[in-house]
Image: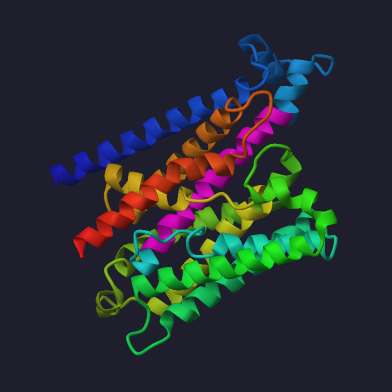
Amino acid sequence: MNNRRNSFILKAAGLLFGLVLLLCCFIASVRFGFTTVKWSDLTAALTDYDESSMEQVVILTTRVPRALIAASIGASLAMAGAIMQAVTRNPLASPSVMGINAGASAGIVAAITIFKVTQMSMLVWISFGGAAFATAAVYTLGSLGRDGLSPLKIIMAGSAMTALFASFTQGMLVHNESGLQDVMFWLAGSIAGRDLQTLLAVLPYMGAGWLAALLLSRHLNVIAMGDEAAKGLGQRTGLIKLAAGIIVVVLAGGAVSVTGPIGLIGIVIPHIARYVCGQDYRWLLPYSALFGAVLLLLADVVARFVILPEEVPVGIMTAAVGAPFFIYIARKELMAK
């Protein structure tokens, strides 16, 4: 009993530390960039806003919305990755590796370049549709054969669908060069230029996804043990996997609709969170959300300084961090076998 209580206290303290770290990263995101914001301007913008002050206008119209977007997208992608790793029992599973981001991206590129859709409310649902189609396709392909779904087959199916959707996207851009400029920076995964209205259009869906993921966390603990063990404990595995798939589609599809495809957060963060808090998804999901938000905020701050006065798309920064980690995890799994 004492060990359980001590474990609870340590994990709760870790979450509190994560919240403090998130707040520090949020402030850093608001303060630092091409123009560094003074503490006096930051406090004045929040307590006594002056529209004639350019610094305060930049804080409330650009920096704060950008930080909120980074935190929300990072949390969503990290939670989606953690859920996928539980359902597939594959440590390499994530929205970017499994083709979900690519499917959502292809849908949005088609909507923008071919059908000239610009309303964010429509792009959100198109992104959901592309993500849902990719999820269904990967699950179907990974389930073919007598041995059914396996971690290796689902990764291969995800890689194939990612390549397929990438080809579709490139083909659409080749035949519609006028739309290339509209989506090029977005395809690299970027937070720059997004305003608060863009986030607000998708935030209710993301919020529902976060809450649903936390409510499902107890069932994910059982699903992660395997289908036979879950069925033996009375779990309705099909229904749980369907609910998990819907949550992943909402979180990943919503993220892509705002910032474009930002990769590898869904792989890196769940492993870091698992190292800190263990395998219990009741803790793993909140930790993943916090760490995902922190990572994307930090990546966005660093992206502002790499090639001043220009900015590097934040998707490139996360890829630079995530690619070596992906290789490490893949090698570790191969050596274990």
Q: Position of residue 290 (x, y in %)?
A: 45, 40
| Residue at x 32%, y 38% (from the top left corner) | 12
Q: How many marks?
A: 0
Query: What's the image's color scheme?
Result: rainbow
The residue depicted at 72 percent of the width and 49 percent of the height is 184
Residue farthest along the left direction in this orientation = 2
- Asked if 209 appears above or below 325 in the picture, the reply is below
Counting from the top left corner in percent of width and height, residue 154 is at: 42, 72
Residue in the image at 41% along x and 61% along y: 93
Magenta segment: 62-85
Q: Quadrant of the C terminus?
A: bottom left
* The image quarter in which residue 252 lies: bottom right
Apparent side of residue 232 relative to residue 293 in the rendered image (left or right): left
The percent position of residue 79, horizontal first and vertical second, equals 46, 53
The image position of residue 180, as x and y in percent, is 78, 53
Q: Is residue 99 visible?
A: yes
Residues 108 and 323: in front is 323
- Is 71 one of the magenta-colored residues? yes
Question: Is 59 a magenta residue?
Answer: no
Above or below — where is 36 with respect to 220? above
Residue 148 higher or lower than 100, as above or below? below
